[in-house]
Image (tube, coloured by chain):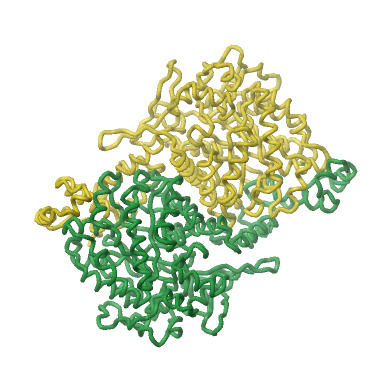
Chain colours: A yellow, B green
Amino acid sequence: MVSPAQSSFSPARKTYLVGSRPDIRVPMREIPLTNGSTVVLYDTSGPYTDPAHTADLEKGLPPLRSAWRSPDDTASCGGTGSCGGTLAEGRSSTGALTQRARARRGEITPEMEFVALREGVTPEFVRDELACGRAVLPANVNHPESEPMIIGRNFLVKINANIGNSAVTSSIEEEVDKMRWATRWGADTIMDLSTGRRIHETREWILRNSPVPVGTVPIYQALEKVGGKPEALTWEVFRDTVVEQCEQGVDYMTVHAGVRLAYVPLTARRKTGIVSRGGSILAAWCLAHHAENFLYTNFAELCEILASYDVTFSLGDGLRPGSIHDANDEAQLAELRTLGELTRIAWEHDCQVMVEGPGHVPMNKIKENVDLQMEICSEAPFYTLGPLTTDVAPGYDHITSAIGAAMIGWYGTAMLCYVTPKEHLGLPDRDDVKAGVIAYKIAAHAADLAKGHPGAQAWDDALSDARFEFRWEDQFNLSLDPDTARSFHDETLPAAPAKTAHFCSMCGPHFCSMRITQDVRAYAERNGLTDGEALTAGMREKAEEFRREGGRVYLPMPALPGEE
Amino acid sequence: MVSPAQSSFSPARKTYLVGSRPDIRVPMREIPLTNGSTVVLYDTSGPYTDPAHTADLEKGLPPLRSAWRSPDDTASCGGTGSCGGTLAEGRSSTGALTQRARARRGEITPEMEFVALREGVTPEFVRDELACGRAVLPANVNHPESEPMIIGRNFLVKINANIGNSAVTSSIEEEVDKMRWATRWGADTIMDLSTGRRIHETREWILRNSPVPVGTVPIYQALEKVGGKPEALTWEVFRDTVVEQCEQGVDYMTVHAGVRLAYVPLTARRKTGIVSRGGSILAAWCLAHHAENFLYTNFAELCEILASYDVTFSLGDGLRPGSIHDANDEAQLAELRTLGELTRIAWEHDCQVMVEGPGHVPMNKIKENVDLQMEICSEAPFYTLGPLTTDVAPGYDHITSAIGAAMIGWYGTAMLCYVTPKEHLGLPDRDDVKAGVIAYKIAAHAADLAKGHPGAQAWDDALSDARFEFRWEDQFNLSLDPDTARSFHDETLPAAPAKTAHFCSMCGPHFCSMRITQDVRAYAERNGLTDGEALTAGMREKAEEFRREGGRVYLPMPALPGEE
């Protein structure tokens, strides 16, 4: 049986935009409509939805970016999962240039060309945005399986899905399945937040099979290495963990280098203290040693390591608010100022950088977050969790946070980290992963529309046209989730004729406004009644004719099951 | 078996705030917490969640407002469903004064006192808001079963749930159950949009059993009376239908009097024409007769009828946009200007008025809608459907629209009409009704928070406190939907000890940031480490002590099933 995660979106076809060399093939989803036209959408689902691809999780995805490697880049670990389970010591980067460094040199890499095609912009625009730091293109030289994508506020808003097992539950197989399921529904990146045993092996399976960039929080694995005791952490353990993950191919890493010793007391009067796992671990370390955060004091060396693999920094907001009460407080803003300082240091090392953001924020304080981040962090891309706009709805935090995510995306956030319905309550299963991804695709697209992103509205227009013209199959196929749209329609009107009916069960045939409008419009156009002035000036004879033409606005309809 | 719609929210208790007379008893939900405190929330669920109440749908709810009647008000139809099924001709209001008229006379009615207690404001404030038209208190003298509530932007944001059968599906019993289910989860009003057979009887059952105001769109029933042919409608048929519904006790009515003949051609270039059912019916009538909308030309007489029962106008936006493409276009704005004109006419008749709004609107155009409505309609309460912020997610329009609803509520909309997951696809069942209500309670509360409504944040704070202190049961009981929060937690950690565990399955015990924070905070406070300056100035001995105290920040934890 084919896994649901890799079935194609029939009747949609996988198509490829080909670049200046034949191996630059940008995947898109082409949806054929019943009126003969097609709609082409951005596609994150990877080779799994291409019928020409035979998935083999043991083998991993084809290393599409291997052939693009410059001679001065490091050798990869093979892309076949062969290095799984062993620490890849001795193999280290020999100093690959980052996409940022190449952009600053004026170079257009195959990755840049790929994302330019994918976003519908020029390669020069991509290069400029990367060079000035307003965008990142996470692409570890050791993760050649990933399809290049770009994160920046002048591109489509992206979403991330967190997966990963905990000490309490779930298996590697489940996590790989969640990764494929998340990208199928639209996740632009995934983060593996595993904290249990077999962290390395889980990550290896995910990396070798992931068509999207993979992020991690290395402090989790470092903590496992020291028996779960924060005060036992050292810079050396952390550094070795980072090198291990760089070798494997992690594309971006959350580093809580902004949780400085002096900021920890600022959280004392909070309702919910420190809610970032990484932030709380480092706060515990700082207090235990009464010393400055070792990530802060060793940041320059960290930059050198990440730069040599082109691993992108995601500067973690370890002091993000965990409740409406704590939003935009001094602890958060103090850390943000440090993240600005670190952004500029990382840029000096030609590292790519994005900056993480809240959290829980009421709507009236969201814009302030974005404005401050842009100013303080010199426009480095903002990557936010939610934010949740209220604390009172556990079980529905994909919705409380989709509200905040849509708004913060509109205001300028480049990537939105999803929240699932299980947030605060438990580990998300695959249904929760889908629910979170769909809610965030909605938020991201709503933000694209509000920002006036060129081309974003074409999708809405195509679906609205299909809706108005009662092309039900087209409406389903154009939906963010065709399966759900189709099944909801079938619940009340399951018979096949309902798929061509000029109404739905919501209103029934006599009250379908769209149908009435169509009749009205057809009549008005046929008779030149398209001008308000002329109408009120008087054309009563036209009205007579309208009545004579049939005495009714409705067309005769066949009876449907259940219709009265 | 007790219907789920009337089971109490155990352990929450139904309590009542008593006013200046013993029969002014305002229902509230009191949630006892395990730390000995209580949280009291606004409650819309009616007598059904009071164990002292024995529900009898045949008999209907007690007519609590009957005793408040002034001698000059009309006699009720009995409140027992006895007038069901027959047109109550001959029984008409003898000229009740509206809440607006009484407010303008300086009178504080029992209804005003009731809502003042319910909202935590003074009765004088309620009266002032009603007198100037910035709020409405929908309370037909013939619906004495309803618990008074107020709609206005200086009060809590309210939500409406649409129910009602169509020609295609569902029964009266199902609709009454949906009404009770919707109010249980927080619907402040419901609209009965039935269009099939037995419209009068369905409405009678709903009215006699509804603890919240009931709205309708009378043109639907009028259309049924003329065989479903818009062009056969007459002012007389419509007027008689309105009187019939006033007699029954409908609290507010949507009237599409702003769909003027000259505006119909303005919809010609739209993607989705006219998507309001009422709007399309009246547009068809206007074109068929080449005449001005009979609701517009007879508006003064309509005002007299509604005023005499104190039925509130909901001026329908028949030309609201049905797609992102059509948002804020000239058709919509032309109608809005007419609604402003009609608002002032209705006010001259001392009618209460609210004004309906869109629809489908991208985020960047939402604020303009509210600002224009306030200006053009002289601050009459705005009552909006959504708006949906994108068209591409049928099956998830409770989310696409909760985003818009939260924002428009923040900007000043007084009541949000819910959208369910079935929007555009089918008739909502009871699960959809709950999903829509919960999404809209989230939007309304997020708006209250953003507006800085006094007291709104206390709920979030109480839940965040419970979360931080691992009072799981309190967290569940304080949730908008305790059942879902509890069951999601149980899915991954079902054992009873997990309810007192200081972590959840999301992170497991070693990675629980809140737990680490608590340990850090306790240690810091014990040792005076609550000042950043002092910390950095050096107190290394304290750090030594922290390590000596146990060498770990975690407390020993009992093993749980599944924990590794």
Rendered residue at 30%/56% (across/down) = A505
Instruction: Tell me residue A72's x, y (percent).
Output: 61, 13
Question: Which residue is outermost to the top?
Answer: A71
Where is A33 relative to B149, above or below? above
Q: Is residue A198 visible?
A: no
Comparing A50 with A304, the one in front is: A304
Relative to residue A319, is residue B48 drawn left or right? left
Comparing B536 with B547, the one in front is: B536
Where is B431 relative to B545, above or below? below
Comparing B337 with B475, the one in front is: B337
Instruction: Tell me residue B389's x, y (percent).
Output: 43, 47
In what quadrant of the picture does the C terminus of chain A appear?
bottom left
Q: Is residue A340 visible?
A: yes
Relative to residue B524, is residue A310 drawn left or right? left
Instruction: Tell me residue B427's x, y (percent).
Output: 34, 58
Rendered residue at 43%/81% (across/down) = B63
Question: Which residue is outermost to the right?
Answer: B541
Comparing A282 with A92, the one in front is: A282
Instruction: Tell me residue B283's x, y (percent).
Output: 23, 56
Label tally: 0
Rendered residue at 52%/81% (across/down) = B24
Relative to residue B536, is residue A538 drawn left or right? left
Q: Quadrant of residue A170?
A: top right
Q: Quadrant of residue B485?
A: bottom right
In what quadrant of the picture does the N terminus of chain A appear?
top left
Where is B380 relative to B270, above or below? below
